[in-house]
């Protein structure tokens, strides 16, 4: 067996949560080793936010997260806030801007964030070992023993920060769930979140001409609704509004699409009818919506002819088709494209202040592998920073 290294802390996973946890523990004079099977640390940070990393959201709060226990995230979020992360970013001279809806992005590159975390880890004396495969994890009275492709490591505290199942092509493994089960912790069923939704072949074929069209929308599922862009694709429905609602949607459920929710469409159509009764409904609707979408929706309602011939009932029917369009997605694109994994390590088994397993002293779970999932827009990184900091502060 290769090298044998003893440290206070081992963090498995050099992603957002793992690196933040290592930094905080190192700053508190713990000896910390971070292990990862990947070639490079923070690969998801690198590809996030279209390469500019939407690193936090100034509106992050318990209401912007999904979890079987909506209270669990409160403590960690309160003790490491977006302002705390911004302060770190500012200390490193990284330029950033607010795009919209409180979403903060790097001006230049997501690599600036990775560089910052690596610099902080170095300053805190953290050791990083990449391309290291985890073989077994055991616990005895002295602590934890992790057998890897690079030899054995021992530690008093073991932090699991290996993320969820999303984007298996990038090395997502579900490792955290296996470790949780190994130590008798419960799991909340996992499913893909922030993911495009797919449609049955008949509906998909009918909306094929709309592929590429984007429109401001409100997408609703029950009492939850998101106002952002809707995008029609050749695979189904996407865009931020769909990704957001996908985390709430369950197989078999219907969603309601309201296109141009800020427009009083009935008033517009009535005025159009009054002003020019000889124009078609498609033309009148095309003043508000992209032309192909206006054509699709009027044809779907079998509405043709002049506006003058359209009764008020017909106008209402058309408005309903545009602003209360009910669709039953057939599924989602799955983990292949999902930005996050919903569910995970059941928070009932974790201490919300420290992320430590209640039944296994010294074992911690942080970041995406825990059953706390944020909305789209920088919330998931904020959870990674906050839960990583909470663990790093206590171990
Ligand atoms: P993360 O997945 O970042 O890190 C886990 C680490 O563990 C990886 O380095 C991996 O290699 C390692 N690992 C996994 N299994 C292992 C094993 N068996 N052995 C050893 N190491 C192992 N969020 C946000 O807030 N703003 C954004 O802009 C985006 N954008 C975005 C784009 C895309 C395309 C995706 C897929 C996701 C996002 N996200 C996001 C979500 C965000 O990336 C995610 O929530 C965090 O990266 C989660 O951080 P973690 O540290 O928990 O896991």
Image: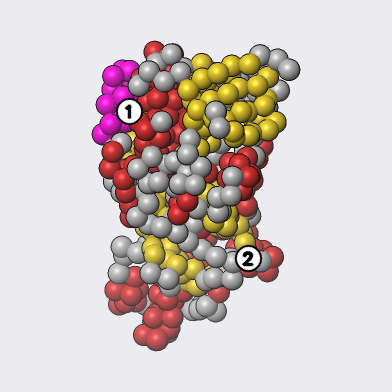
Residue 337 as seen in the image, left or right of residue 26: right
**What residue is shown at x 53% (from left), y 25% (from top)?**
155
Residue segment shown in magenta = 83-97
**What residue is shown at x 59% (from left), y 71% (from top)?**
252
Secondary structure predominantly adopted by residues drawn in magenta: helix
Secondary structure state at the residue bearing disc 2: loop
At label 1, counting other C-alpha atoms closer than 10 Å, the crowd grade (few under 14, some 14-19, many 20 or more) is some
The residue sitting at the right extreme is 1
Q: Say if the magenta span includes residue 88.
A: yes
User: Percent position (x, y) of residue 304?
Assistant: 51, 78
| Residue linked to disc 2 | 330
**What residue is shown at x 32% (from left), y 49% (from top)?**
74
Q: Which mark is residue 96?
A: 1
The residue nearer to you, when weighing 201 against 392, is 392
User: Percent position (x, y) of residue 127?
Assistant: 51, 16
Q: How is the image coloured?
A: secondary structure
In this rendering, the answer to whether 28 lies above or below 352 is above
Can residue 94 be seen here? The reply is yes
In the picture, which quadrant includes the N terminus?
A: top right
| Quadrant hosting residue 315 | bottom left
In the picture, which quadrant includes the C terminus?
A: top left
Of labels 1 and 2, earlier in sequence is 1
In this rendering, the answer to whether 211 lies above or below 219 is above
Can residue 105 be seen here? The reply is no
In this rendering, the answer to whether 339 lies above or below 224 is above
The residue sitting at the front extreme is 141
Residue 291 as seen in the image, left or right of residue 382: right
Distance from label 1 to label 2 (Cα)? Answer: 39 Å
């Amino acid at each position: 067996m290769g090298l044998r290294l003893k440290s206070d802390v081992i963090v498995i996973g050099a992603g957002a949560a793992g690196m933040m946890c290592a930094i905080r523990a190192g700053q508190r004079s713990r000896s910390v080793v971070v292990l990862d099977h990947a070639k490079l640390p923070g690969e998801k940070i690198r590809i996030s936010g279209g390469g500019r990393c939407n690193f936090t959201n100034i509106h992050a709060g318990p209401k912007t997260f999904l979890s079987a226990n909506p209270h669990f995230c409160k403590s960690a979020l309160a003790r490491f806030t977006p302002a705390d992360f911004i302060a770190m970013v500012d200390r490193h001279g990284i330029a950033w801007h607010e795009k919209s809806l409180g979403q903060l992005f790097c001006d230049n590159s997501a690599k600036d964030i990775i560089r910052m975390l690596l610099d902080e880890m170095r300053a805190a004396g953290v050791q990083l070992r990449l391309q290291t495969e985890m073989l077994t994890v055991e616990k005895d009275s002295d602590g934890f023993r992790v057998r890897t492709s690079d030899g054995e490591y021992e530690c008093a505290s073991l932090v699991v920060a290996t993320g969820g199942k999303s984007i298996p092509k990038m090395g997502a493994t579900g490792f955290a769930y296996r470790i949780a089960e190994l130590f008798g912790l419960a799991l909340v069923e996992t499913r893909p979140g922030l993911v495009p939704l797919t449609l049955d072949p008949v509906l998909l074929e009918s909306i094929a001409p709309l592929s590429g069209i984007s429109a401001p929308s409100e997408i609703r599922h029950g009492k939850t609704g998101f106002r952002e862009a809707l995008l029609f694709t050749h695979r189904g429905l996407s865009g931020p509004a769909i990704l957001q609602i996908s985390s709430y949607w369950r197989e078999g459920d219907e969603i309601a699409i309201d296109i141009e929710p800020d427009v009083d469409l009935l008033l517009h159509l009535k005025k159009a009818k009054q002003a020019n009764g000889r124009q078609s409904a498609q033309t009148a609707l095309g003043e508000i919506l992209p032309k192909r979408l206006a054509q699709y929706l009027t044809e779907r309602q079998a509405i043709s002819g002049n506006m003058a011939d359209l009764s008020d009932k017909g106008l209402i029917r058309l408005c309903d088709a545009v602003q209360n369009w009910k669709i039953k997605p057939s599924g989602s694109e799955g983990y292949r494209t999902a930005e996050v994994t919903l569910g995970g390590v059941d928070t009932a088994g974790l201490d919300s202040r420290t992320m430590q397993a209640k039944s296994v002293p010294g074992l911690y779970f942080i970041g995406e592998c825990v059953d706390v999932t944020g909305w789209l827009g920088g919330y998931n990184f904020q959870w990674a920073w906050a839960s990583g900091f909470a663990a790093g502060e206590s171990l």
